Image (spheres, grey):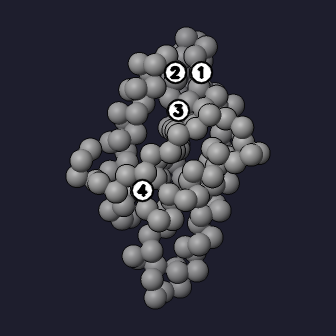
């Protein structure tokens, strides 16, 4: 399956590093993360790994406040952590880098890679500076 999307035998011999990204066009907190992910993936390649980016959900409190969508906000934290863990386990990643930048994605995004039930090296980037990337 990896070869069907362009990965080579050489790519697959290297450590597979999942890049869990909460990029979305829905709000400014996470909007810049796609550009940051591109730089992180370059670094992973330079270090001898094979990056594989995937997305997770992201809910904007600024949009949901005072509406029915507000009921989805806290639940999204668990969904984010669970989705990162599921993708990492299902795709046999050797490590995870998590990209998150808002109060919903920051706390839970880091729990996926760092959870005791998910023993992989991980790093979490938490940035609130979209103009600096």
Image-quadrant location for residue 81: bottom right
Disc 1 packing (10 Å; few <14; some 14–19; many ≥20): some
- Classify residue 121 as left or right of residue 37: right
Indicate which disc, 4 or 3, sits on the residue closer to the N terminus.
3
Horizontal side of 56 relative to 25 (left or right) equals right
Q: Please report whichever mark, 1 or 2, sits nearer to the chain's N-terminal start.
A: 1
How far apart marks 4 and 2 lie (CA) works out to 24 Å
Give neighbour class at mark 4: few <14, some 14-19, many 20+ (Cα, 10 Å): many
Q: Secondary structure at mark 4?
A: loop
The residue depicted at 40 percent of the width and 39 percent of the height is 37
The CA span between labels 4 and 3 is: 20 Å
What element does badge 1 sit on?
Answer: loop
**Marker disc for residue 25:** none
Residue assigned mark 4: 101
The residue tagged 3 is 52
Residue located beneath label 1 in the image: 15
Q: Nearer the viewer, residue 19 or 128?
A: 128
Residue 64's place in the image compared with 19, above or below, is below
Q: Are the two marked residues, 4 and 1, in contact with CB atoms closer than 8 angstroms? A: no
């Amino acid at each position: 399956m990896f070869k069907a999307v362009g990965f080579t035998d050489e790519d697959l011999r290297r450590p597979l590093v999942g890049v869990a990204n909460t990029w979305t066009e829905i709000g400014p907190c996470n909007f810049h993360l796609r550009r940051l992910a591109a730089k992180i993936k370059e670094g992973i390649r330079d270090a001898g790994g094979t990056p594989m980016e995937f997305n997770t959900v992201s809910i904007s409190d600024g949009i949901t406040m005072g509406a029915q969508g507000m009921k989805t906000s806290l639940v999204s934290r668990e969904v984010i952590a669970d989705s990162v863990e599921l993708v990492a386990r299902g795709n046999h990643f050797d490590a995870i880098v998590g990209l998150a930048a808002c109060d919903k994605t920051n706390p839970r995004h880091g729990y996926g890679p760092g959870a005791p039930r998910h023993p992989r090296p991980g790093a979490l980037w938490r940035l609130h500076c979209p103009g600096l990337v």
